[in-house]
Image: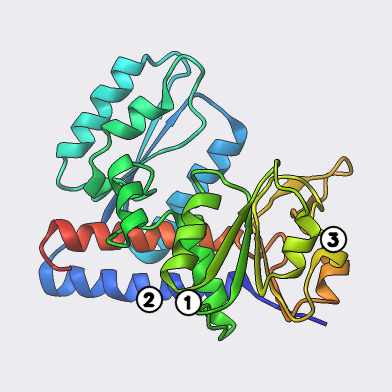
Amino acid sequence: MAQIIDGKQVSASVKQEVKDEAAKLREEKGLKVGLAVVIVGNNPASRVYVNNKKKACEAVGFQSFEYALDENTTQEQLLDLVNVLNRDDRVNGILVQLPLPKHIDEKTVIDAISPEKDVDAFHPVNVGRIMIGDYAFLPCTPAGVMRLIASTGTKIAGKQCVVIGRSNIVGKPMAMLLLHESGTVTVCHSKTKNLKEICLGADILVVAVGRANFVTGDMVKEGAVVIDVGMNRLDDGKLCGDVEFESAEKKASYITPVPGGVGPMTIAMLMKNTLTAAKQQNGLA
């Protein structure tokens, strides 16, 4: 039976590190770290995320600036706000909560955020830097996954790593981070043939497809580390991941649960990115 990787515990240790360092910056440099979160419209899921980010800011001693804009806010108005925040010295990180209303082009908005304040690491400059391995910020979810793998004591170098999913937010950067740690990486997606065979070769299996219970135990190599990035709600209201937990747990050496695995790490790594941004902007990194 696999050991459960406790995302709540690992994320708590990341937040504690950030909190200690933020306190030191305040005491020694008089520097308060600030994160601005912009939400447009009233998507209930987005509102939950924004509230969680505010709570996390409070917990680690950051200033949090929330800008809740009306559903009918124009793209021009949103871009104006982003420009103001780019120039605001109190704001070290800017996060525009996605998805945005249909009439606003997400790419244009992401491109408008200063790369130095892009704590989601979605800006093309930061994406490119991840590609070449010269990065300040990592996308929060893949960075969280790396921390979870590290918590097991597993060394990535030389291991067969399989990532299922090729999104810009998780799959692609995840593959690059594993590659930077000298893993041998295969990226699978909806057009991949012989998926089961490929998965059975994986020492480290990261699943991010957004399909409930997509990976079953018969696709998991004995002793593999299984990281489930998925978060799906079943018809009965229960949350589940992209991995069928009970059958996979019997084969894996380590596995993340859903909820309580990758989820808590995402906000913890956002706090870490915001701290890094503050240090860089003040010549302390």
10 Å crowding of disc 1: few (<14), some (14-19), many (20+): few
> What residue do we see at 58% from left, 75% from top?
9
Q: Is residue 214 above or below residue 155?
A: above
Residue 17 numbered tag: 2
Q: Is residue 18 visible?
A: yes
- Label 1: state its secondary structure: helix
Q: Kindly give the residue lying farthest to the front in the view shown.
A: 193
Asked whether disc 3 touches disc 1, contact meaning CB atoms under 8 Å apart, the reply is no
Label whose residue precedes the other's in the sequence (3 or 1):
1
| 2 vs 3, front mark | 3
Residue 78 image-quadrant placement: top left
> What residue do we see at 52% from left, 31% from top?
99
Amino acid at the residue labelled 2: Glu
Q: Which residue is mark 1?
A: 13
Asked whether disc 1 touches disc 2, contact meaning CB atoms under 8 Å apart, the reply is yes
Tell me residue 169's x, y (percent): 50, 46
Tell me residue 38's x, y (percent): 38, 35
User: Between 112 and 43, which is closer to the camera in this rendering?
Assistant: 112
User: Between 93 and 199, which is closer to the camera in this rendering?
Assistant: 199
Q: Is residue 262 above or below residue 71?
A: below
Residue 1 numbered tag: none
- Label 3: state its secondary structure: loop
Distance CA(mark 1)–CA(mark 2) = 6 Å
User: Between 140 and 74, which is closer to the camera in this rendering?
Assistant: 140
Q: Which residue is mark 3?
A: 216
